[in-house]
Image (cartoon, rainbow, N blue to C red):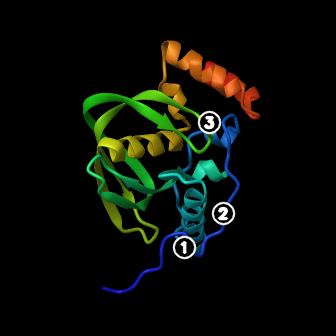
Amino acid sequence: MRNRPIPGSSGHVRAMTLLGAPVLHTPCEPVVDFGPELERLVEDMFATMYAANGVGLAANQVGVGLRVFVYDCPDDEEVRHLGHLVNPRLVEADGEVVRGAEGCLSLPGLEAPTPRFDRAVVEGVRVDGTPVRVEGTGFFARCLQHETDHLEGGVYADRVTGWRKSRLLRAVRKEPWGDRAEVLQDR
């Protein structure tokens, strides 16, 4: 087995895109150019995710409107899942719907109980074009659904309803970037 560098170890931390930025609320474009620029993007995304103490990060969260996300996320049995997906598609989401605490690096410091299926399957390719199928359960399934939502132009707050959404909107308005709360109200 060859030694591989730790993902993100040669990457640069990019600025995080916050709620309200148009790129965060627009469906991402498929990747068509595979090569050094894509590899650099993935490496930078890992570095950015780790610097922000996240478990997943979509390209539009660093201002790039491409269908790419990275993850380093445990499941409910504390098994670590580490990787990236290019042009991912959520092909299955089933099982029980669990309303669990969910946060987002683009809504820093906030979280809300968000309903998600406890099993998810995502298919896509790696940076070299190799096909991949990733299956997750529990918290990792939540991560897979969360990141694919980003690539469709959504944030977890779009899935929050009722009084929970009202409470989240009040918390957003208290943040320095809270003037962007109207984005959530329109969805």
Q: Is residue 20 toward the left or the right of residue 55 in the image?
A: right
Do labels 2 and 1 touch, CB within 8 Å?
Answer: no
The residue type indicated by label 3 comes to His
Task: Tell whether 169 sits left or right of 39.
Answer: right
Question: What amino acid is found at the position of numbered circle 2 in the picture?
Answer: Val
Image disc number at residue 165? none
Mark 3, mark 2: which one is toward the viewer? 2
- For the point 54% across and 50% down, the residue is 58
Where does the C terminus fall, quadrant-wise?
A: top right
State the residue lying farthest toward the top. Answer: 163
- Circle 3/circle 1 CB separation < 8 Å: no
Looking at this view, name the residue that lies furthest to the bottom: 2
Q: Residue at x 59, y 70 (%)?
A: 40
- Please indicate, yes or no, whether residue 67 appears anywhere in the rendered image: no
Q: Is residue 101 above or below residue 132?
A: above
Q: Which residue is mark 2?
A: 13
Residue 25 image label: 3
- Hey, what amino acid is under mark 1? Gly
Q: Secondary structure at mark 3?
A: helix
Residue located 55% across and 69% down the image: 8
Checking the image for residue 35, the label placed there is 1
